[in-house]
Image (cartoon, coloured by chain):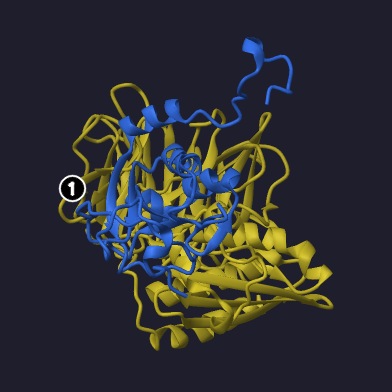
Amino acid sequence: MKALLLSLLLFPLAALAQAPVIEISGANFRPLPLAAPAPVAQDPGAKKLAAPFDAALSYDLSASGIFQVLDRASFTADAKEGMTAGSINFSRWADVGAESLVKVSLAQDGGSLRAELRLFNVATGREDLKVAKDAPADQPRKLAHTLADALYRHFTREPSPFLTRITYVRKAGSNRDVFVADWDGNNAQALTQGGTNILPTLGPSGQVAYTSYRKNRPDIWVQTPGGEAKPLVTEGQMATGAAYSPDGKRLAYALAEGESAQIYVANADGSGAKAITDTPYGLNTSPSWSPDGKRIAFVSNRGGSPQVYVMGADGSGVRRLTFQGNYNQTPDWSPRGDLIAFTARDERNAFDLFTVNVDSGKITRLTQDQGNNEEPTFSPNGRLILFSSNRNGTPTLWVMTSDGSNQLPLPMDKGSWLTPDWGAAPASP
Amino acid sequence: MGMGGGNRGGGRTTMSEINVTPMVDVMLVLLIIFMVTAPLIQQGVKVNLPETKATPVEASDKKLVLSIDAARKVYIGDAEVSLDELEAKLAANAKAQADKEVYLHADRDVPYGVVVEVMAAAQHAGIHNVGMITDPSGGGRASKAPAAKPKEAKR
């Protein structure tokens, strides 16, 4: 946690002084060819921690969408090549197509692990970035995320997704349990033990709200990090789809009653709830806040089929956003504001992911012919989308860039993983 | 000769060389081979290039260069690799795979079979354009005695 805060404080300043910026969006975007040889362990202790560190760092860089991480099998550099510009044979790195080179050394000092990362421009042989970070020796992956974040900020001048947290549901037998984890699905903790717990959402201060049947009826419960679960919304026949406003002060959710379901907005503690939709027989579900907290996207079947709509956070100015297909659901509003990702069922009854531009209504397809792909959720910086896909048999979590490229499975253990939600900020106490 | 019994036909000769003919057949179909001039190519590996009169293509120094020196050692850039690992290295090489082209920088005294093996490795790795780096400076025949020309290789 300390290292994490430190990086947040230090890196915006360090990054501003640097020239190279990767423009992530736009027609001219091209991932930067990056060589990242295995970290060099300075002692036997670091040697043991190098593998998990390396796995986490390599995954972050590969999934970032801004790098083309080069295959280590092609490398021709001397295995004993040093860490400094003077000792590196840059022509060998140019020969494997690298434009940038990242070298990392690891050293263990008692209970802490220290990593030093250096970034070189292969064409000029210049050292562009040098970062040294410490972490407890039992958290090599955390240390890797911190360094990956530093690299990401250097190139994009934006915070990376690597230090954020996610929540999701594990399906095991008849149980559905809620987990929170690091962005890559590792370092996971179970928040519930058995029963049916679904549709979790991660709030800005690390609290997780989810629908639980622990009182034999579907209510929304909330759990703060390290705290006990408490009931949050117990009205109606069924409360689902909790979503915290970006400032964390309000909670939107759907309450089903008889033939209809309405969207409510309440204070974060559940008080002062007020319905903001009012359709006598229709279903209104799955609210998702705009980044400025002024609007809410949701699903409604008021037009005959489930479609994505947008309205003011007070329920005013309802506007239909999707007109293609007859089954569009689970909208998630990008933190950048421009796009809403959603799940659509196509004519072959397959579920796939799309984005719709909030202003123009332009639809972009993100997945196709890869099983069912559902429940998109944007990273806090809006560059990546996490989703659930059963393309390999059981549903598991996948990540891709917001335009649908670079689709990768999260490096998680085997299991059935569903309904991810990407939190806004690191879950720190 | 003929000591290695078991040869039918009385053991006049033993076929100990690789038969490159089938490989050449395949490669002539799939490989595009062209001549490249040397001056732009700065290589760490010392080789005596063949001299030719053929009109060469002006070399781009951005392409990956494979070298074979007089001792038949193979290099990617200036890094020595074994012939066994060459194909895997090239298949993983982002630069060669993006260009689909490499330059071959081989000593004039390297046996044809070795050159073909390197070209076959490149072809198996999906690289279909091979530029043969030659020395046009003398304009002499390729068969000229090696001593007739100054050494081309640098450093």
Q: Residue at x 39, y 68 (%)?
A: B152
In the image, A133: left or right of A354? right
Q: Residue at x 57, y 46 (%)?
A: B83
Using the image, name the chain to which the residue with label 1 belongs. Answer: A
Q: Secondary structure at mark 1?
A: loop
Residue A164 x %, y %: 54, 64
Q: Colour of chain B?
A: blue
Q: Nearer the viewer, residue A342 or B29?
A: B29
Viewer can see residue A291: yes
Write down which chain is painted yellow.
A
Q: Dividing the picture into quarters, in which one does residue A38 lie? A: bottom right
Q: Is residue A10 above or below residue B101?
A: below
Viewer can see residue A165: no
Q: Dividing the picture into quarters, in which one does residue A367 lie? A: top left
Residue type (three-letter) at the residue carrying disc 1 = Lys
Q: Dividing the picture into quarters, in which one does residue A256 lie? A: top left
Q: Which residue is mark 1?
A: A362
Residue A368 x %, y %: 34, 34
